[in-house]
Image: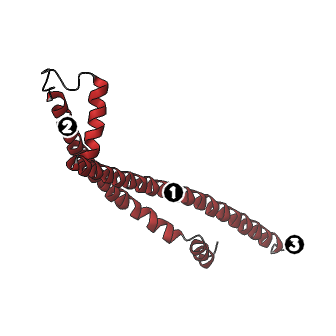
Amino acid sequence: MQMSNAIKLLAQYETDMLKSKLRTFPSIIKAQKQKVRDAREEFKETDQMRAIHEADLMTDINAEKDPVTGKAMFSNDKTRQAELLRRKQNDFAYQEAERAAKAAQIKLNEAEDELDRLIDEFKSYRYIVGLTTQELALLASEEREIDSESATYQTASTKEPY
């Protein structure tokens, strides 16, 4: 295969761009993994704050006594859970903590989705490079066969008759 043909083929197959992309993916993926870790930590913190507010509400519910009887105001689990739901809806601090936890969960999901997308794209480029390698090897093999046949023909046609 002539050198100019090889260079044209490499340009046609965009091998420089493919190699460049493959080299950049590890650092991009590493950076995205850090974003996922940061988002996961933020979610854990905000969800913990939400859980603390919920526990405080439940503690108050469990501590309440009926002023007439002196017994627990909410005596069974169903009434305690119903009261907890009611208080969650009316408690500003809990509502804020819940919004922060939901926002952090969304941020985490988006970071994980982006990481998955980057990994999928990296795998796609690796697959494309593999196919490109096979195609170029096939073209080179065909070129060698043509060159070999041409050389054999030239050798046979240039022989002097005895």
- Residue hosting label 2: 57
Amino acid carrying mark 2 in the image: Leu
The spot of residue 102 in percent (x, y) is 32, 50
Frontmost residue, 8 versus 94: 94
Residue 92's label in the rendered image is none
Give the residue number, with chain letter if any, for mark 1: 126
Q: How crowded is mark 3: few (under 14 residues within 10 Å), some or many (20 or more)?
A: few
Q: Nearer the viewer, residue 130 or 120?
A: 120
Task: Tell me which corner region of the image, top left, top right, bottom left or bottom right, holds residue 140.
Answer: bottom right
Does residue 77 lie above or below 18 as drawn? Answer: above
Which disc, if any, is residue 161? 3
Residue 148 occupies which quadrant of the picture? bottom right
Q: Label 2: how many residues lie within 10 Å, few (<14), some (14-19) or many (20+)?
A: some
Q: In which quarter of the image is the C terminus?
A: bottom right
Residue drawn at the location 20% of the way across and 42% of the way down:
53
The local secondary structure at tag 2 comes to: helix
Residue 111 as seen in the image, left or right of residue 144: left
Quarter residue 87 falls in: top left
Drawn side of residue 103 relative to residue 3, left or right = left
Q: Which residue is drawn at 29% across and 30% down?
A: 81
Name the kind of residue labelled 3 in the image: Pro
Disc 2 and disc 1: Cα gap in Å? 53 Å
Amino acid type, mark 1:
Arg
The mark lying in front, picked from 2 and 1, is: 2
Q: Residue furthest front?
A: 68
